[in-house]
Amino acid sequence: MKILVLNGPNLNFLGIREKGIYGKEDYAFLVSMLEEKAGKEGHEIEAFQSNLEGALIDKLQEAYHSGVEGIIINPGAFTHYSYALRDALASLEIPKIEVHISNVHKREEFRHVSVTAPVCTGQITGLGLSGYILAMDYLKYHENLTKKC
Ligand code: DQA
C-alpha cells in the first residue's frame, strides 16, 4: 500500500516542544519507527512535515496524482481552523486517518474542535506516537477488507 504520512506545524519540534505533552522522542524517531513498520508490512511510505499550510495542501494534491492509497495526517494546530486543509482532504476519496499525539479533548477548548476530522475516515487522539502505528494498522485492515469485497 502506498501511504503518505503528513505532519503539520511544529511537529518537527517533537522532543523539544512541551515534552510533558508530546513526549521526548523526536520527529526523526517517529519517521524511522513508521518506516520500519512500513518496511515489515510491505508498504511504500512517504513522510512529509511542513510548518506551511500551502505546502501540506500541495502534498495532498500531489497524492491524488501519484496514486497514494492511504493518508495518516497530524495537522497540528491547523486541525482547529484550516478550512483550506479540510477542503484539500475532502478532495481525496481514500482512507485518511487524523492523528493527535495528545488528547486534544483534555486540553484547551480551542483544541476540542477539529475542522479536518469530519472529512477524515477517523481520528486517533491521546495515544502518543503509537497513534500513528495504529493508524497504519487501520490502513492495512481497510486494505484487506476492500480486497475481500
Ligand atoms: C496536536 C494537537 C494540536 O492541538 C497542536 O496544535 C499540535 C499537536 C497533537 O498531536 O496532539 O501541534 O496535533
Image (cartoon, rainbow, N blue to C red):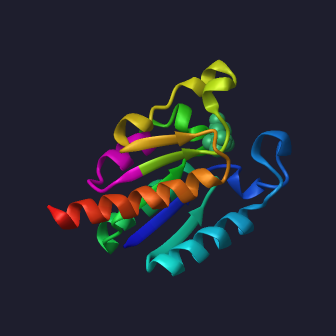
Q: Is 34 positioned to the left or the right of 136 in the image?
A: right
Q: Nearer the viewer, residue 144 or 124?
A: 144
Q: Nearer the viewer, residue 41 or 90?
A: 41
Q: Is 42 positioned to the left or the right of 15 in the image?
A: left
Number of numbered discs overlaid on the protein picture? 0
Which image quarter is the C terminus in? bottom left
Q: Ligand 1, what quadrant?
A: top right
Q: Is 103 positioned to the left or the right of 75 in the image?
A: right
Residue at 30 percent of width and 70 percent of height:
65
Q: Is 57 positioned to the left or the right of 125 in the image?
A: left
> Is residue 88 magenta-colored?
yes
Q: Position of residue 23 (x, y in %)?
A: 79, 49
- From this view, report whether residue 11 is shown above or below residue 21: below
Q: Position of residue 48 (x, y in %)?
A: 57, 65
Residue at 63 percent of width and 39 percent of height:
126
Residue 117 in view in this figure? yes
Which image quarter is the N terminus in? bottom left
Q: Position of residue 130 (x, y in %)?
A: 62, 54
> Is residue 3 magenta-colored?
no
Residue at 30 percent of width and 72 percent of height:
67
The residue lying furthest to the left in this view is 149
Residue 54 in view in this figure? no
The residue lying furthest to the top in this view is 109
Q: Nearer the viewer, residue 68 or 147?
A: 147
Q: Position of residue 105 (x, y in %)?
A: 61, 26
- From this view, report whether residue 11 is shown above or below residue 144: above
Magenta residue span: 84-96
